Image: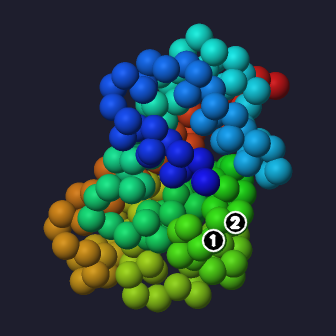
Amino acid sequence: MRHEEDTFRAYKLGPEAKSDPVLAQELYGRYVAEWTTTAGPPAEWADYLVVAPHAFWGWAEFHRITMADGMNEPRVKAGVVMYLAALEGHQTWAIHVAGRPALYDLTVEEITALGACDISGFDGEMHAVLRYVEEMTYSSGVGEEAIRGVRAVLSPGQLVELGMFAGLHLASIRIDIARRSSAH
């Protein structure tokens, strides 16, 4: 079972499961085993979970409310996070998605393009979203063309969710970059 499914299964067990360090360590052990074949999570996470299993549940909740729930498709969300990570020079998310293209409904070619910050091969919704997110996060304002493009493919609710989603994940990416650089 993929770690995403495990965390959601455990999350749905209820509040009592969130304080179960044995279950948290078992699920996190599966998560670590899966990631050690790619980039691997930091070892300090496992140490932290021994004394604070709630951290794993916090991650599961963050993932659920941003990736699994909501109005925008997981494919679009994964594309946004991959693109933001690539623009920030952070490869962890790219490695995660590359190992699970079917989970996020992205092709290997799309993953490669996103990892190279190249959105020229995308059209329709994905192109409009990625262009809007880039302008929203890396310029002093979003141009009229990008606004028209994203409004043509997203409802107002999806647009609000997209802004919140991109902001949360950009902050998460930057925190991880800072954490990794301070560890060296």
Amino acid carrying mark 2 in the image: Ala
Rate crowding at label 1 as few (under 14), some (14 to 19) or many (20 or more) other CA atoms within 10 Å.
Answer: some
Looking at the image, can residue 116 be seen? Answer: yes
Q: Is residue 8 above or below residue 114?
A: above
* Image marks 2 and 1: residues in contact by CB distance under 8 Å: yes
Height in image: 151 above or below 157?
below
Q: Position of residue 152 (x, y in %)?
A: 24, 83
Residue at point 68%, 82% (across, down):
109
Q: Secondary structure at mark 1?
A: helix
Residue 128 x, y percent position in the rendering:
39, 78
Q: How is the image coloured?
A: rainbow
- The answer to which image quadrant residue 95 occupies is bottom right
What amino acid is labelled 1 in the image? Pro
Say which element carries label 2: helix
Provide residue 171's location: percent of width, then percent of height. Answer: 48, 40
Is residue 113 visible to the viewer in this orientation of the structure? no
At a point 27% along the width and 64% down the height, the residue shown is 71
In terms of image quadrants, where is residue 82?
A: bottom right
Q: CA distance from mark 2 to mark 1?
A: 6 Å
- Of all residues shown, which one is farthest toward the left? 156
Q: Is residue 34 left or right of residue 72?
A: right
For the point 25% across and 75% down, which residue is it? 154
Quadrant where the C terminus sits is top right
- Residue wearing tag 2: 98
Checking the image for residue 101, the label placed there is: 1
Total numbered circles: 2
